Image (cartoon, rainbow, N blue to C red):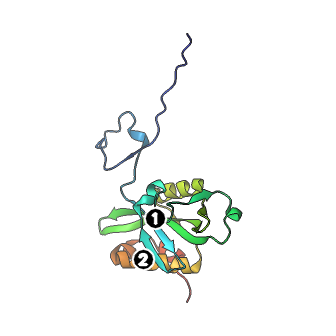
Amino acid sequence: MDQEKKKKSIGFNIIKNDPTDGHGGFGAGGALSLENISPVFVDPEEGEAFVDIGAMHARSVVEKGIKFLPDRDKVPSGKLYWLVWVTIERLESGPYYAGVTACEMTVNREARRGYKSLPEHVNRMDKSLKRQIIVSHMDDASKRVLADFLQKHDKGMWDRSLPQLKEDLTVEA
């Protein structure tokens, strides 16, 4: 009997804290820590933002019961949401918003359908973890909601954040 030998692939491990304690041994290079990232939903229609950790596995309140399609045109009259990946980093002076990236999604609850680009969501999460700011493509109402949320959550973190974040979320009145 010919048995096919399957190679084991070493993928990324999602971990909490650092179980390797920095030893850098086998498999440690592919470890990904999601400890300092949070998914924030922005609902511009309601003028609110909220954290929903369920979004880490596409099981947020917004996403539950919805079949997402990769074609925006197949979800007519969907309600706009932004999933914003917010990564926190610590300086000597205290924590700050180091990576903030936004992904668009629409949801039509009545039709139980929605639009989102899963590759975009994964790539934006990665870019947030890599301390990038990508929010300039958001609409003005959503930028206001997100800026207010981040400032009210922790004014010190907002003050310590990169000027690019503040500039990209500034909307003229």
- Residue 4 image position (x, y, % from top left): 55, 18
Contact check, label 2 and label 1, Cβ < 8 Å: no
Q: How many marks?
A: 2
Using the image as rendered, state which of residue 169 and residue 67 is in the foreground: 67
- Residue 27 relative to residue 92: left or right: right
- In the foreground, 152 or 29: 152
Q: Residues within 10 Å of mark 2 (few under 14, many from 20)?
A: some
> Tag 1's secondary structure?
loop
- Residue, x 51% and y 26% (percent of image)? 7
Q: Can you identify the residue that label 1 sits on?
A: 61
Front tag of 2 and 1: 1
127 versus 169 height, above or below: above
Residue drawn where x is 40% and y is 78% of the image: 151
Q: Amino acid at mark 2?
A: Phe
Element type at marker 2? helix
Apparent side of residue 126 relative to residue 120 in the rendered image (left or right): left
Can you give x and y, in whole percent of width and height, for residue 140 in the image? 57, 80
Where residue 90 appears, as percent x and y from the top left, is: 33, 63
Residue identifier under label 2:
149
- Residue pushed farthest right? 73
